[in-house]
Amino acid sequence: MSAVPPPSSLPTDGIPIGAYDVDALLGELSGDAPEESPESAVCVRVEEVFAPAARFLIAEELAEFLEARGITPTEFLHKVEPQRSFLDWPRRALVLERVAQRQARPGRRSPAMRLEELKRLEQEVLAVTARRAHSGTSLSIDAKQFAATVAQTMARTPGFPGRHTIDCWLSAWLGEGRNHELRLVRILSLDGDGLSGEGIAILDQIVGEMLANGLVVEALFGWADGLRGVLDAMAMVWRGEAPSHPDAPAVLHRLSAFVARHQARAARLGLEAGVHHALLGDAPLSGTKAEPNSVAAVLDELSAISLLASRLTVKGGVIGGERTTRLIDRRVALLLSGARLEAVLHAKSHYARIVDLLAFEGAVSGERSRRMIVAHLRRHLEARDFTQRLFETARTPRARIKALADLQRRVARSTLPDGLRERYVRMLDEIQNTFLRTNKVFARIAKDRPPHVDEVMEFASLLAEGAFTEGKCVAAARELVGHHVRSTAFLRGYLARCKDATEQRADRFAQFFATLAGAGLPMRAMNTLRVLLADDEPAARGYVEMILRDLGITDLTIAQDGREALTRFEERQGAFDLIVCDWKMPRLSGLEFLKLVRAVRPDMPFLMVTALATIIAVEEAMAHDVTAYIAKPFSPEQLEEKILVLVNRR
């Protein structure tokens, strides 16, 4: 496995909008484009053709030839008959020319020079095979015999000669397998406790070559559900985990154990080759039933690609390395190619296009894939006539304000590069701010005059709905609405409106508090208040209790005189948010109770109810820090106003 380098961050400023053109990038990511062979696979001496890197190159380039004969590169290199058949294969010349092109290096070897080298090596390998290939009776070996043979052979003829002898022997024995699954079972059966590292490497190489064969992958993983199921199962085996599906062949348990026990590099390389081959195809990963050119279909496929990328991610990189990443990005590029994307976004408004593109951006995982979508988003967000096009389908001021705020939220939640995301968030706030000022939207609730209650609540509702962009606009709206809703005049007007309402007053107040909380202007909800009510007159006490409960207060402690009020206060250790107390009571007056409360709770909101609204009485109460007072008789709205102001003092 090749470790994937950390993704480079996308520059946020000064990038040409077309820098990541999808159609151009498709050419760059084309999975069919030949890649340069690694130098380890560029053979000059005959021994190098038998090295692991060269064998995997043979598995890739001669896949059609090998699959037709059901053999591995190891068998091809150690048997005379398949090599002679290859000399007569109609596609031989094309394959050799392609390999020569891949292995050419400017200034060192031209394609023509490399082609001549390949033809020379072809003849030399055939000569070695004809001289050293196994001949004789059929072999019968087990794990113990194989371990002993490896040890003896490598001790007698170390290096290439010994390895070649064992590979010839195994190639003759392996050819007797009746099918791909059985051949894999046979080779894995040779893995035993006494096997040396050299023996494990020999088995690992052949297992890897088998797994690089498309027909073997089909035989082993054909039970899986769809392409994504196949790739998930291959990723599990790569990790050394056995698939638990009831239809999975038993040999996968043995293969997974082999990979886990030996960290089998060649077996993993074979699985990676299978992953690459599967990703090169055009079968969808999602199995979506949505219309092919619908946003749902694209999102389903992008989500499936993202989940697959996560499954293929392991400690240190990605299964299959950079090539896997490129092939995943290629699939995204095909989904978002110019024609396909235009079909998906066709006839949609500018706003809807941006919403869809942001959804796509959130569904991809690869860096190149994200750059493709960022390119499309930049074209839409940085269009010269962006505001005009955005407002084409949002005709009313309310709709335009909401469209800008909604886009800003989506951009803020996106995974766009930080600098770019912040720039667009500010841009959308500036556009809304300009719109609000130009159209004098806030003039209706200006501070210099008391607005109508309904107008203030309309803007509070807009705030609660998230209709204003974060930044200048939401701050301005919150300041204006907050200025009014905490004023006595507003509360008086709101309560007067409640007086004529048909629905329950408590429900209306609950809605009022919920709206303000959603607007970021929380007022103390009445159902959270702990209130102590003290009055010795049953009728007056019942009247105040009714008003408090209509206001939504549920935690209400009632005392019938000052002494009982003090007892209740001490029982709860002063754990009240408000005291509503009559002045004239037996045993302990309201004023005497106030003095005792102030001794332990100097900040306790204390509302005195009195029939003595004289200046002397008021001055006496104020001298003992009464918070507020209300004179009898009073209407429900007057008491409600007092309480709302008291518990929401700044």
Image (spheres, rainbow, N blue to C red):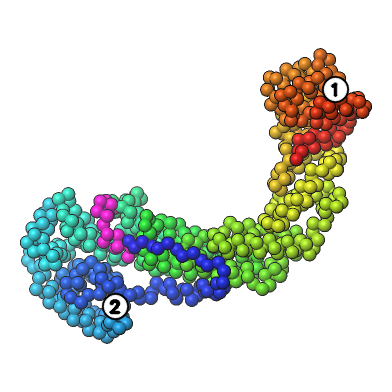
Q: Amino acid at mark 1?
A: Trp
Against 566, residue 628 (above or below) is: below
Q: Quadrant for the N terminus, please.
A: bottom left
Query: Which contiguous range is marked in magenta?
Result: 256-273
The answer to whether residue 111 is magenta is no
Residue corresponding to mark 1: 583
Against 145, residue 571 (above or below) is: above
The nearer-to-camera label among 2 and 1 is 1
Q: Is residue 283 visible?
A: no
- Give me the residue at 18% from left, 75% from top: 45
Q: Amino acid at mark 2?
A: Gln
Residue 510 sits in which quadrant?
top right
Lateral position of residue 306 relative to residue 232, left or right: right
Judging from the image, what secondary structure is the residue with disc 1 in? loop
Lateral position of residue 551 relative to residue 221, left or right: right
- Give me the residue at 25% from left, 71% from top: 40
In percent of width and height, residue 387 lies at 70, 68
Lateral position of residue 305 relative to residue 192, left or right: right
Residue corresponding to mark 2: 103
- Give me the residue at 85% from left, 50% from top: 451
In percent of width and height, residue 508 lies at 77, 40
Lateral position of residue 310 relative to residue 213, left or right: right
